[in-house]
Each structure stands twice: as structure tokens, then as C-alpha cells.
Image (cartoon, rainbow, N blue to C red):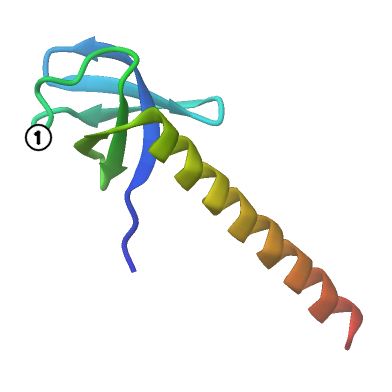
Amino acid sequence: MCLAVPAQLVKVNGYIGTIELGGVRRDCSLMLVSDAKVGDWVLVHAGCAVQIVDENEAKATIDAFQELEEREQAYDRRQSTSC
């Protein structure tokens, strides 16, 4: 399964953008969203920003990913104590 992850655009240098998510910064291509500007939230897949998204939508998606991670960790803890 492939996922696109929402991240905030913090720097633009031509068609290369710097995104930030959870305190981590990475560069990505802005070729598909050439109208993106600093402060926008973008969906990033395989190193490319593929769509500009609403901030509320981005934050809801991030919250959902965090909930999934917490549930997975809780499941792993239960599995390790049941052996």
C-alpha cells in the first residue's frame, strides 16, 4: 500500500520545497504543485508534493496516523505479554 503524507511547506527554492512534519524536514519536488507557497500543506508521496490540501484536512490525517501508531503499539505490547 502506498500513502501520501501531509506536511507543511516551510521553504521554496524553485521547484524544490522543504517540508516539515513532526520536527523533521525533507526536500521534495514541487513540479506537480508549482503554485504552492510557504505555509501551505501538501500531500507528499515518493518525494513529490502531489496536491495542496486544507490545513484542517492535513491535521486530521496526521491525527489519524498517530492514532493508528498508538493502537499498533498497544497491540504489540499485548502480544509480547501473552506469550
Where residue 58 appears, x then y in whole percent? 41, 37
Which residue occupies 48% across, 36% down?
59
Q: Residue at x 77, y 66 (%)?
A: 74
Q: Residue at x 74, y 72 (%)?
A: 75
Q: Residue at 43% across / 33% down in the picture?
A: 56
Q: Quadrant of residue 3?
A: bottom left
Residue 37 falls in which quadrant of the image? top left
Left or right: where 21 falls relative to 2 = right
Q: Position of residue 19 (x, y in %)?
A: 36, 25
Q: Quadrant of the N terminus?
A: bottom left
Q: Which residue is mark 1?
A: 32
Nearest to the observer: residue 64 or residue 75: 64
- Find residue 35 and report its image quarter: top left
Q: Is residue 9 above or below residue 75?
A: above
| Position of residue 60 measured from the top left corner of the image (x, y, whole percent) | 49, 43
Quarter of the image with the C terminus is: bottom right
Where in the figure is residue 27, as x and y percent of width and height? 30, 26
Q: Secondary structure at mark 1?
A: loop
In this view, 36 is above or below 60: above
Which residue is outermost to the bottom? 83
* Above or below, 22 relative to 74: above
- The reply, left or right, for residue 19 in relation to residue 66 is left
Give neighbour class at mark 1: few <14, some 14-19, many 20+ (Cα, 10 Å). few
